[in-house]
Amino acid sequence: MEYRKIGKTGLSASVIGLGSEHLDGKPYAVVEETIHAALDQGINIMDLFMPGDEVRHNIGKALGNRRKEMIIQGHIGSVDLSEQYDISRDLPTCQRYFEQLLKHLGTDYIDVGMLFFIDSDEALEQIFTNGIVDYALELKRQGVIRAIGTSSHNPVVARKLLETGVVDLMMFSINPAFDMTPAGTDVLTTMEELSEQQYVTIDPVRADLYKYCEQQEIAITVMKTLGGGRLLSAEHSPFKKAMSVTQCIHYALTRPGVVSTMIGCQSAKQVEEAVAYLQTTEQERDYMEIISGYRGEGSGQCVYCNHCQPCPVNIDIAMVNKYLDIARLDTAQIPPSIKQHYRSLSASGADCIACGSCEDKCPFSVSIIRNMEQAEALLR
């Protein structure tokens, strides 16, 4: 398993995480098999947003004395008052359900307390005015939660929340179809209706959100990695071609700020299929053939696809471009960590021989040679 640091929290997450929504309503034996398989494969992070007593109890029982091996994202505001998934911004209700989460899991702490489903300006205002953010901050002060997170599908609202400085981690919906959709689109309800004309290149608002997260050391865990399974089907994918699980995972893991992908599993076999990503080749991970008809040729924006490789002097061009993009967000205050990461590369912009082979192969017409020069100027 590979692990990445979760921002400034001091924790590290496996790049393959466990989405537990498919365990809801399943018998305990299924929950136990899936949880144990995940732990045995080195998966150490899972998301648990479901509010039902039974699934929470079953997951807690399955974790048992291995609780400390798993980083749990537990949500504040996920409820089932009407015996179905719902959202509450009422503080006493949120408190009651969060306390029930601790009880059913048989634990006295949750690693990441998640501000649930912040997708609108109204929701953002409510969590601050209704005392929910203060509640989360107090839980963190007491050590009941180790970090504060949030879940969102709206890049504009998510950015506003992140800029308050409250959040350590964001769970966000990331896949090629969502990223190539205009930021104002409700991706959860319109994926089937999206026209091919909308798929031009990665939406700059979404791209900047990911860069901002890495700049500020706010970790991203990914939901909707597979687009609810639609991207795996040529019939249902907006690209009219089926992506593999490996391609979807690789796309998400190559976005700035991303530390882990939450893959929904309900068996040991599905856990093994997700973890198999780690053994795949670069060719198997390559997603550009699938989205080639919508790739926005000539956009000049790097999407870190590595089609520019191999470099004759072994520069990791995508990584240099990623660090440069983050530095460009605020050239006056480039995070020391970004400079450190750049300087630790075995080959950097200073090693570029300006041969141009990378630019000839780039499907986005990125000015790579110029980027290498600018990266060295800003990051050395």
Image (tube, rainbow, N blue to C red):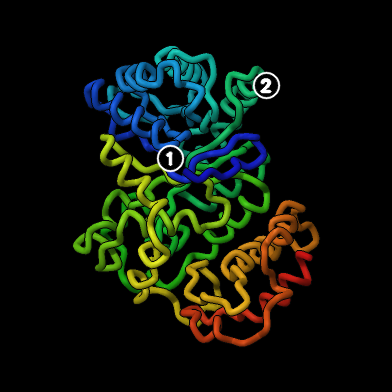
Alpha-carbon neighbours of circle 1 within 10 Å: few (<14), some, or many (≥20)?
many
Instruction: Tell me where residue 353 sits by quadrant.
Output: bottom right
Write the residue at 75% across / 71% down. 376
User: Which residue carries the number 2 mark?
Assistant: 141
| Viewer-nearest residue: 374 or 278 | 278
Mark 1 or mark 2, earlier in chain: 1
- The image position of residue 66, as x and y in percent, is 45, 21
Identity of the residue drawn at 60% across and 35% down: 11
Q: Residue at label 1?
A: 17
Q: Which of marks 1 and 2 is in front?
A: 1
Instruction: Farthest residue to the left: give it.
Output: 235
Mark 1 residue element? strand
Classify residue 201 by image quadrant: bottom left
Query: Does residue 292 appear in this view?
Result: yes
The residue positioned 78% from the left and 57% from the top of the image is: 333
Q: 112 or 15: which is nearer to us?
A: 15
What is the quadrant of residue 141 in the picture?
top right
Q: Which of 46 and 183 is in front in this view?
A: 46
Q: Position of residue 159 (x, y in %)?
A: 59, 49
Residue 116, compared with residue 140, is above or below; it is below
* Amino acid under disc 1: Gly
Q: Is residue 20 above or below residue 252?
A: above
Q: Position of residue 263 (x, y in %)?
A: 36, 43
C-alpha span from label 1 to label 2: 26 Å
Q: Position of residue 128 (x, y in %)?
A: 60, 32
Question: What label does residue 342 carry, if any?
Answer: none
Badge 2: how crowded within 10 Å, few (<14), some, or many (20+)?
Answer: few
Give SS at disc 2. Answer: helix
